[in-house]
Amino acid sequence: MPRSRKKVNCERLCFSVKRIKVYMTWNAKLKFEAKELVSDNKAQKAPRVLIIGGGVVGMTSALQLLNKGYKVTVLAKEYASPVSSGKRITSEIAGALWEWPPALCGRHTNEKSLERAKVWGMDGYAKFMELAMNSKETGAFLRRSIFYFKDKGSAMMPNSLKKLGSLNTDTGVVDAYQHMAPMVDTVTYMQWLYKQCREKGCHFVHDEIHGLLRDQAEDLKKKYKAQLIFNCSGLNAKELAGDEDVYPLRGVILKVRNDGSLMPKLNHSMCISIIKEFDESDKEGQSFVFILPRGDDKLWLGGMVQPHQWDRDLTLDYPPIRRMFEKVKEFYPPLRNYGDDDVEEVLVGLRPARHGNVRLEWDHVCPSLLHNYGHGGLGVTFSWGCAIEASAMVDRVFKRPQIYLSKL
């Protein structure tokens, strides 16, 4: 019996060695084919994609495609400004705290959409965890986040998150959870995205387009020598895609210092949902408040969700902003040490929302046009997940291996 057992073990070992050899041969072949694709790219044979939109969704889509060996042209009216500039695009003034869907600022209206959003969210979580290893360059930080709720039904969360056991119910809070979450300094991050794309050969065009994209797709492809077009135009998709479901969700952030001079320095984020259901007819827009550490020495205080409001010229004297400031102080009393003069900047942004939620699909009329818009307040959270799914859709068109050429 011992000899028989030894023989069996030897056969298993030989079988395992064969499997390893087969795997190594297959892996070497895959790397060889990938290098061939890189050579094709250098020989001007790689397909080109034209991306409309220079925000976080468009730039992330560009980087994902570039990493796969595609050629990319990005067309936008505006791009992220240098750090020294005061003018910001919407992506640069996003709160950019990773949230487990559904987000506090808005709601997913159906379960199918929500399940898809969870995949995008987790793809983003993994990517920002990686980028947080180089926070100074990327602007991505990993910090503790606490979410408070005034009704238990709102606290939708994965089982892996930690629920807080002891709560002071006198404040109206009845449920809460915490987890380590990526927080992104989007001014730094958008510059990092731009730099990555530029170094990988992305071509940037400053221009704007009007009218339906599908009606001018062939002319655009010819002009920019592209085979496919990505519509990552955010709110402009209302015109470019003829989508009447697209609308703005206006948000406001107050920027104050977080250097320990007026209160102990805060190193974790806090968010609270202050109403049970998001109501788009609410003109006040005060459905939640948040406190977010930004970079090394700033705090961002918010927030507001005002549907169908386009005006961005607001100040601290605007009554809903004044009330928002007071609610944040009520939620976190140490902030009462901050007065109007301590508010360094009032940032107003328009979240590109859509009834029916994110649209990530091929155009029903123009087969070379792919839509990727309607992310609302989750543009940063969903950016990588949507870019990964969109690039896989392109891979299937060109029947290319779904691999990252830049890592081989």
Image: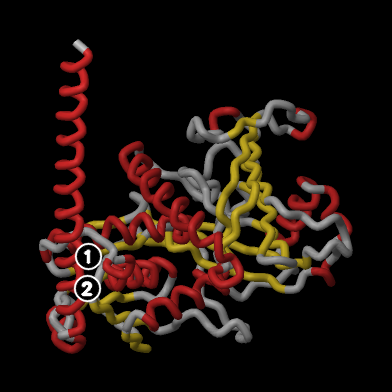
Numbered disc 1: secondary structure: strand
Relative to residue 287, is residue 401 drawn left or right? left
Q: Quadrant of the N terminus?
A: top left
Q: Gap in Å between the C-alphas at discs 1 and 2?
A: 6 Å
**Residue in the picture at 28% in, 64% down:** 404
Residue 348 picture quarter? bottom right
Numbered disc 2: secondary structure: strand
Q: Position of residue 391 (x, y in %)?
A: 25, 62
Relative to residue 135, is residue 13 drawn left or right? left
Disc assigned to residue 320: none
Image vertical order of residue 127 relative to residue 241, above or below: above
Find disc 1 in the rendering and name its residue. Answer: 370
**Residue in the picture at 20% in, 71% down:** 35
Out of 239 and 177, give the one closest to the viewer. 177
Q: Are marks 1 and 2 in contact (CB under 8 Å)?
A: yes
**Residue in the picture at 33% in, 72% down:** 62
Q: Position of residue 165 (x, y in %)?
A: 69, 26
Relative to residue 191, is residue 342 drawn left or right? right
* Disc 1: CA contacts within 10 A as few (<14), some (14-19) or many (>=20): many
* Disc 2: CA contacts within 10 A as few (<14), some (14-19) or many (>=20): many
Residue 292 picture quarter? bottom right
Out of 249 and 282, give the one closest to the viewer. 249
Out of 380 and 237, give the one closest to the viewer. 380
Find disc 2 in the rendering and name its residue. Answer: 229
Q: Position of residue 211 (x, y in %)?
A: 25, 78
